[in-house]
Amino acid sequence: ADEYMIIDLESHTKDDVMLLQKKICKKIEEFIISEKYKVVFTISTGIIYAKMLLKYYDEYRKIAVFSLKQAKSMGGNGVYFFEKEDYELFLRKEKIKSALRNAVANGFEGFDVYYQPIMDCDSGHMIGAEALMRFSMYQDKKKEPVSPVEFIPLLEETGLILPAGRYVLDKAVSMCHEMRQYIPEFKINVNISYIQMVKSDIWKDILSSIKQYDLPPECLCAELTESGYTDMTPYFYKLRKKFEEKNLQFVLDDFGTGFSNLHCIVNMKPNYVKLDNDFTAKAMSNARDFELLKKIVEMVHSIDIRICIEGIEKEEWYQKLKEIHVDYLQGYLFGKPCEKNQFLNKFIFHCTDQENLTDL
Ligand code: C2E
Ligand code: CA
Ligand code: CA
């Protein structure tokens, strides 16, 4: 077809190989010009060590295919030199993707939903929780937890975020229903990926889910990050309107890490914004960053929007934020994300006194 393998036993360095690659490119360019641009080619070049290929043909053929694929993904005329680490990462991703596919096909085996409390800063009372997806791969009957930072992008890449997101939504709404027996105003926050927004009628899913459990729409907060929406501000506004019409809550997650400015936020009108863990940690260890955090809180409040600060790990951080009138808090200090039953035991059955929740 249009793929060729050149085994060059004369080249010994990367420079040698690049010289050969340039020579080929030049010839092809000359050909294109001589054909008066009736045909246009670009060439992608994946490079591996020939000696290895000769020794372990089968395995290294796969590596050659991988290297070419990498070069192609770099765009026209890409050149990629094989790196073992890239290949290992690729294999790991393929393994996780296959485990995710199997898990979704097998009734979400290996998936779980954890919950982390969200506190009212002023009173220290729990007002709700954030639902966080968990996934473990099974190999030789051994369970290996995979970090959401690793598997969520793969769910998005494969489109599996649609069924997996529905699974989380259903579990989360059911948990909220249970919690409202003890805390009537309890709200549940669910993370929604950009893909879920464009490829599914997410508000319909949400509405049918809360109807099933007989809950009011305002008990569900959809957490959206702005990062996926760069250059799509009008689309974001449209979604926002839909949420408002249906009385669903909308929270802007990872606030300050994307493109948002005051104008965007005024138009988006989130019910509240969430400031990321990384920002909190920086602000707590550096006076200038804390000043910035203070200004952000003032700014957000000045346009009548509330703010939740994530990543609260120490009591003194909590006290500092209380002084500047932050609205909501979330972090290990109040509780690490845990399974539903653990959550109930910790926050409802073992400690019914709301005053003491922050001591847990
Ligand atoms: P996120 O939405 O920003 O969630 C907060 C993350 O901070 C969680 O990480 C949580 O475990 C962690 N965290 C909470 N308190 C503290 C603290 O005091 N200190 C520190 N250092 N970290 C804290 P997690 O569970 O690993 O989730 C990572 C990300 O994966 C989430 O970030 C979210 O973007 C995504 N994610 C999780 N579940 C879902 C889901 O169901 N759907 C979608 N689309 N994304 C999800
Ligand atoms: Ca979130
Ligand atoms: Ca966040």
Image (spheres, helix red, strand yellow):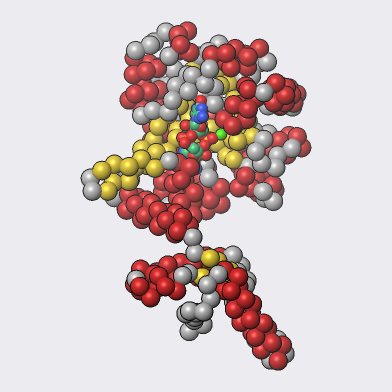
Numbered-mark total: 0
Q: Position of residue 189 (x, y in %)?
A: 50, 31
The image quadrant that residue 28 belongs to is bottom right
Which residue occupies the extreme left position in the image? Answer: 141
Residue at 55% across, 70% down? 13
Is the residue 48 above or below the residue 332 in the image? below
Q: Position of residue 146 (x, y in %)?
A: 39, 42
Is the residue 322 above or below the residue 290 in the image? above
Q: Position of residue 7 (x, y in %)?
A: 47, 79
Residue at 39% across, 10% down? 352
The front one of 58 and 358 is 58
Is the residue 151 above or below the residue 56 in the image? above
Q: In the visual, does 112 lie left or right of 354?
A: left
Residue 197 in sight: no
Residue at 35% across, 73% down? 55
Please state, as top left, top right, bottom left or bottom right, where the C terminus lies in the image: top left
The image quadrant that residue 142 belongs to is top left
Q: In the visual, does 36 lie left or right of 128?
A: right
Q: Position of residue 41 (x, y in %)?
A: 62, 81
Is the residue 20 above or below the residue 194 in the image? below
Which residue occupies the extreme bottom position in the image? Answer: 34
Residue 195 in sight: yes
Q: In the visual, does 16 lie left or right of 35?
A: left
The front one of 295 and 23 is 23
Residue at 61% across, 26% down? 280
